[in-house]
Image (cartoon, rainbow, N blue to C red):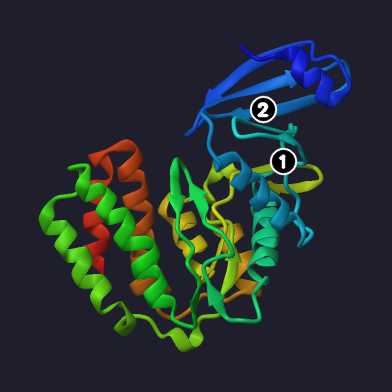
Amino acid sequence: MIDKAYFSDILNEEVRQSAFLTQGQIGPIYRLETRTERYLLKTSEPSGRLETEAKMLEDIKKYGIVVPQVYDLSKTHLLMEYIEEEAVNTLRQEEMAAQVLAKLHRVGNDAHMYGYWYDTTIGPFDQSNEQTQYHWALFWAQMRLMPMAQRCYESGILPKWEMGRIETLCSKLYTRIDMRKIVPSLIHGDLWSGNILFNMNGAVLIDPALYFADREVELAFIAMFNTFGACFWNAYTQIHPLSEDFYETKEPLYQLYYYLVHMAIYGEGYLAGTKKCLERLKV
């Protein structure tokens, strides 16, 4: 049950209605309504996960990118602005998405560090962000691929043979990527269609999994689920052209992490995609 009186005090306006919207990765999500406004309420068991989400949203906002306003926060809830979506032409949506992601990806850091200043989250999982200076391949292997592969293997979803292939890949990952051509860029980190909202004012980013990375990690995930079409790719690559090895190497290498994440959440239905990435990488 939602304590309407509690949130009425916070908002200084009576919460008249609360409605269950969906079951999130870490807890139920609700819409609260007062006489004049709507709000989004995310809930969870006591943890620091919602605090991390609020910090990520505030960090993105610093760069002039629209995210929901945070109104209240605790170990068990995050009260935010409810983003009203509007019908926007698909081509216009893709142009908006390209613009906002290109802007986010222009954010770098002077130390040339990969990772972030604190650990973040992706779905229901913690995402370690120990900062690694200059060495992108080391970060991707040790902070992304191996921890998630180990999680899948220990849960019995990832077969021993496939785990061995990933270990082999990670042991010599530095030979596959020309790190001289990669600059740390701030990425959303979990950019599927449900995590970018559109209205007439532009695109709004929600549910980030923030860190500094090769910006093409974001593009590989977009390509994985075909989130956007040709208009997006044309608009984005006019600002940030794709690297020469994107389709051959980076796309399967970066998609491998997301297949592992989805396997850890949803089960072995994503094993085939994992194997396909390894086959494309000739491991």
Q: Where is residue 67 in the image (x, y as percent from the top left)?
A: 72, 47
What amino acid is at disc 2? Leu
Q: Residue furthest left?
A: 161
Q: How crowded is mark 2: few (under 14 residues within 10 Å), some or many (20 or more)?
A: many
The numbered dot on residue 24 is none
Which tag, 2 or 1, sits closer to the chain's start? 2
Left or right of 20 on screen, residue 70: right
- In front of the other: 116 or 22: 116
Q: Position of residue 95 (x, y in %)?
A: 68, 56
Give the SS element for disc 1: loop
Residue type at mark 1?
Answer: Val
Q: Nearer the viewer, mark 2 or mark 1?
A: 2
Q: Which residue is outermost to the bottom?
A: 180
Q: Which residue is at 70% across, 61% downward?
A: 99
The quarter in which the N terminus is drawn is top right
For disc 2, the marked residue is 41
Please name the residue shown 55% across and 80% down the image: 183
Mark 2 element type: strand
Q: Where is residue 170 in the image (x, y as percent from the top left)?
A: 27, 71
Residue 51 appears in the rendering: yes
Which x, y percent locates residue 175? 30, 84
Q: Is residue 127 left or right of residue 271?
A: right
* Residue visible at 56% across and 65% down in the picture: 116
User: Residue 143's quadrant in the figure?
Assistant: bottom left
Q: Is residue 206 visible?
A: no
